[in-house]
Image (cartoon, helix red, strand yellow):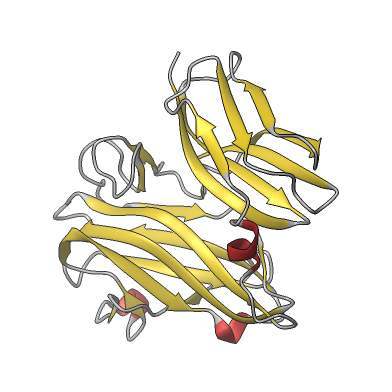
Amino acid sequence: MENGSSNKGGKNSFVYNSPPASITDSPVGNYSSNANTAMISSQEFDLTEAKAAMLSYHTLWDIERRYDFIQVLASVDQGQQWVPLMGKYTSLSSNPLVMGQPVYQGSNLEWVKEEINLNRFTGQKLKIKFVLKSNQFINKDGFYFDDFSVQIIDKSTGINPSEQNNRILYTIFPNPAKDAVHISIGHSITTQSIEVSLYDIFGKLFLRQVFPNSIHRIDLNLANLPSGLYFISIEAAGEPVIWQKLLVLH
């Protein structure tokens, strides 16, 4: 995710559903008055060949009811227009800014798995954005999300490509890592090559390398990377095999 406002979201290594960290609008303390924080996916999700698609993530939140709100939105035109999405845990807002739109509001202090149907966006490419807006009065802890995933059912096969590729056995170690991280692949991949990318939490690309399908171990040099939370993306034939958090500590 890349930050889209003057209020900077980021990682929280103390509150998470799966280690080592979650993403939050306010990493240190409560969100500010008149906050307008947007975290936008740097990745564009390709649903052009999708039969069906589902967005899922784990989330918890604590915000002022009615006056402050969180929305998750989708765009099919590179962020020119955004459509609010309704999930299992959203409710319709009475805030004049987003009257009648689905939002997260109030408090939910236990991790829940949110699922949002994306079928109306099939045949298109999609970006996702999380937004928190507050007024000038009560400030609370804010919004956390973790384990973000878009699951796609392919038109031709009816199989989720990421599930198919996940049959490839892999291990990423150590995690946390210091100067290097190693990716062990259990068997040869049937595609011609695999692509490994490394992003920070705002979607900035730090590394991208392509390897032959015969490789069984990949070693990535992290010595020049700043300490922090990153995401390793592994793709085969253009489809995601894994998207995993990696903590770098020097």
With respect to residue 105, does 173 lie above or below? Answer: above
State the residue in front, 43 or 26: 43
Q: Is residue 170 left or right of residue 29?
A: right
With respect to residue 193, does 45 lie above or below? Answer: below
Q: Is residue 34 left or right of residue 226?
A: left
**Which quadrant: the C terminus?**
top left
Residue 53 appears in the picture as rendered: yes
Tell me where residue 181 sits by quadrant: top right
Taking the view exactly as shown, the residue that stands out farthest to the right is 192
Residue 134 appears in the picture as rendered: no
State the residue in front, 140 or 186: 186
In percent of width and height, residue 147 lies at 41, 54
Residue at x 52% of width, y 49% of height: 1
Give the total of numbered labels.
0
Residue at x 59% of width, y 26% of height: 182
Q: Is residue 69 left or right of residue 185?
A: left
In percent of width and height, residue 100 lies at 33, 86
Tell me where residue 203 sits by quadrant: top right
Tell me where residue 85 sits by quadrant: bottom left
In percent of width and height, residue 15 lies at 24, 43
With respect to residue 121, does 239 lie above or below? Answer: above
Taking the view exactly as shown, the residue that stands out farthest to the front is 187
Residue at x 79% of width, y 36% of height: 211
With respect to residue 48, does 195 lie above or below? Answer: above
In percent of width and height, residue 162 lies at 61, 62
